[in-house]
């Protein structure tokens, strides 16, 4: 799913209005009907107090139009105009008049007015600011927002939680609504997926407001949200007459004394994601653990017992996943440098391999084009330097991946794959996956997919999705606290199967169909 910028959303409105020959008021009415239906379906005429806080722009206009529909259906509403600006939009004024024509008189809130009483059993509709927010709300508006947040009422945000900027972080943490649920129009917003702003956007849902299909299809976006639909398109089915050679040979290089487990997890990731053959190149101390843990893996060892000192193996893998458990011993650094100088094989670079590169920036130029780099936040910082905000991080990371011509996987709650100036935001996964070794499994999965012939960027996008989906399946049985990297690796198969599961039909509907 495409993620549009604020500017693109305004263009989409304009385009739709012209192409479908509707007025902007009619477009707003579409929005309002959808928002009303959402509430009506859940409330079914119940009578909790619904407080609608409306700004003076079009977000406020949406709120006023919803208020009208709620009033017409007999709901218990109280409408407030948050009078933060004199510049009212036409659509706001039209909807204000319609409401007054029905004898609904909003309360006008300003700096001087008292804060209204809100009980925790009430519902708040937050239509104060939408995507038009262009500066931090004034202090009295921030106080109102804090008051709403403290009420513990259920807060439904219209389009975005008021106070959220689409392209920068919140400056005053009191000047943002903490919504329980967001009904966002047509396209999710980038800010929902970044840690600093995503904390305010836990639950969101798309409302289809009928933006013109041509616009949606033709307009290119920098960011795309990746869920099952998107990854299914890149899935490569297994062929009937295939043999293990068809699906490539992954080589995992890494491990040092006490960190052999990382390579076992990576090898398991590669094998379970479908790599035809998987080998590992380890220091000697890794030989027995790897062979005992996984009979499917072929192992070659370094001349050294505890660390890798010479990347010398006699096999020709399709792809190498390098870094898990590697360590940064000086002999290893030297050997890795020599390896990069001579290597022609595609690479997935992780963990200590990335740290070695960060500490020896000359090595950057030796990274083959289209390599996949999978840093966690600290490793990323060592690579690209500190950032001011998540938005700044994305820009710096994008630049880095463009300069290096690599696929950069920024790991996090919503892992983002960056390639050629575009970003792919993952939607699978859960907080239980923040556990030791989870990243090693991911390295293996991406390596295994590249071995099978997936183009690098698709392997990264698909791998990240599968890894998250395996975590989602595993957590159902284990719970967040007990989810382990091994269980993620063991559930990769389940994640493949899940791709092709059809949504379950509710029982009643099933009977009707029969
Ligand atoms: N396609 C769609 O998504 C549609 C969205 N709709 C809704 O319209 C809003 C955007 O409306 P807009 O009038 O442009 O902006 P806001 O209502 O968010 O903002 C109000 C207004 O206030 C000014 N302003 C900005 N920041 C401040 C501030 N800190 N203090 C005071 N004043 C401020 C600024 O000039 C803004 O114009 C979108 O979110 C949807 O809810 C349409 O209903 C239909 C299509
Ligand atoms: K809002």
Image: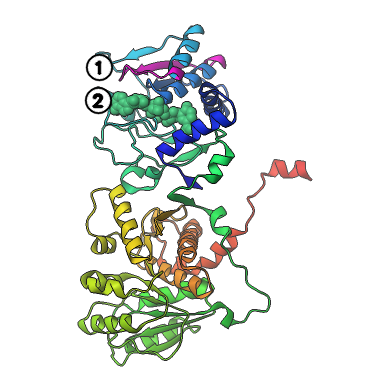
SS state under label 2 = loop
Looking at this view, name the residue that lies furthest to the front. Answer: 18
Percent x, y of residue 179: 39, 34
Is 156 situated left or right of 111 in this image? Answer: right
* Ligand 1 neighbours mark 2 (CB distance < 8 Å): yes
- 174 inside magenta stretch: no
Q: Which label sits on residue 111?
A: 1
Relative horizontal placement of residue 246, taking residue 282 as reference (left or right)? right
Q: Which residue is depicted at the point 29% across and 18% down? A: 115
Residue 230 to residue 37: above or below: below
User: Is 240 rendered above or below residue 487?
Assistant: below
Discs 2, 1 touching: Cβ within 8 Å: yes
| Residue at figure coordinates x 38%, y 88% from the top left | 287
Q: Which residues are magenta?
A: 71-91
Q: Is residue 134 visible?
A: yes
Residue sitting nearer the eye, 355 or 318: 318
| Residue 8 drawn above or below residue 393 | above
Residue carrying label 2? 138
């Amino acid at each position: 799913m495409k993620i549009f910028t604020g500017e693109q959303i305004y263009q989409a409105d304009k385009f739709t209005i012209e192409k479908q020959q509707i007025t902007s008021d009619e477009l707003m009415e579409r929005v309002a009907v959808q928002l009303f239906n959402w509430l009506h379906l859940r409330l079914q005429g119940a009578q909790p107090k619904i407080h609608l806080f409306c700004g003076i722009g079009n977000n406020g206009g949406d709120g006023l139009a919803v208020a009208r529909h709620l009033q017409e259906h007999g709901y218990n509403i109280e409408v407030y105009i948050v009078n933060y600006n004199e510049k009212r939009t036409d659509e706001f004024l039209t909807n204000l008049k319609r409401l007054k024509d029905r004898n609904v008189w909003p309360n006008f809130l300003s700096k001087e007015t008292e804060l209204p009483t809100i009980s925790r059993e009430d519902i708040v509709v937050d239509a104060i600011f939408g995507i038009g927010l262009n500066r931090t709300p004034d202090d009295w508006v921030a106080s109102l927002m804090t008051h709403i947040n403290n009420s513990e009422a259920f807060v439904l945000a219209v389009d975005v939680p008021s106070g959220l900027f689409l392209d920068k972080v919140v400056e005053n943490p009191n000047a943002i609504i903490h919504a329980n649920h967001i009904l966002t129009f047509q396209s999710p917003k980038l800010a929902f997926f970044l840690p600093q702003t995503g904390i305010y956007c836990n639950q969101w849902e798309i409302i289809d407001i009928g933006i013109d299909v041509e616009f949606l299809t033709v307009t290119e976006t920098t960011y795309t949200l990746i869920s099952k639909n998107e990854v299914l398109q890149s899935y490569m089915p297994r062929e009937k007459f295939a043999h293990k050679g068809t699906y490539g040979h992954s080589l995992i290089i890494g491990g040092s004394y006490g960190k052999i487990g990382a390579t076992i997890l990576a090898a398991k990731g590669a094998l379970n994601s479908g790599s035809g053959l998987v080998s590992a190149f380890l220091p000697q101390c890794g030989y027995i653990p790897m062979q005992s843990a996984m009979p499917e893996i072929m192992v070659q060892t370094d001349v050294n017992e505890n660390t890798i000192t010479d990347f010398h193996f006699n096999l020709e893998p399709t792809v190498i996943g390098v870094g898990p458990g590697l360590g940064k011993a000086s002999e290893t650094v030297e050997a890795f440098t020599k390896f990069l100088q001579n290597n022609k094989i595609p690479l997935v670079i992780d963990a200590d391999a990335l740290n070695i590169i960060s500490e020896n920036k000359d090595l950057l130029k030796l990274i083959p084009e289209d390599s996949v780099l999978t840093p966690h936040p600290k490793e990323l910082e060592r690579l690209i330097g500190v950032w001011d905000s998540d938005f700044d991080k994305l820009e710096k990371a994008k630049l880095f991946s463009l300069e290096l011509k690599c696929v950069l996987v920024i790991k996090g709650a919503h892992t983002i794959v960056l390639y050629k100036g575009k970003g792919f935001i993952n939607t699978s996964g859960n907080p239980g996956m923040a556990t030791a070794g989870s990243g090693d499994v991911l390295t293996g999965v991406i390596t295994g997919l590249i071995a099978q012939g997936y183009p690098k960027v698709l392997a990264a996008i698909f791998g990240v999705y599968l890894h998250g989906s395996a975590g989602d399946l595993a957590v159902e049985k284990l719970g967040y606290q007990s989810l382990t990297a091994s269980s993620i690796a063991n559930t990769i198969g389940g994640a493949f199967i899940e791709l092709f599961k059809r949504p379950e039909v509710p029982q009643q509907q099933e009977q009707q169909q029969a």
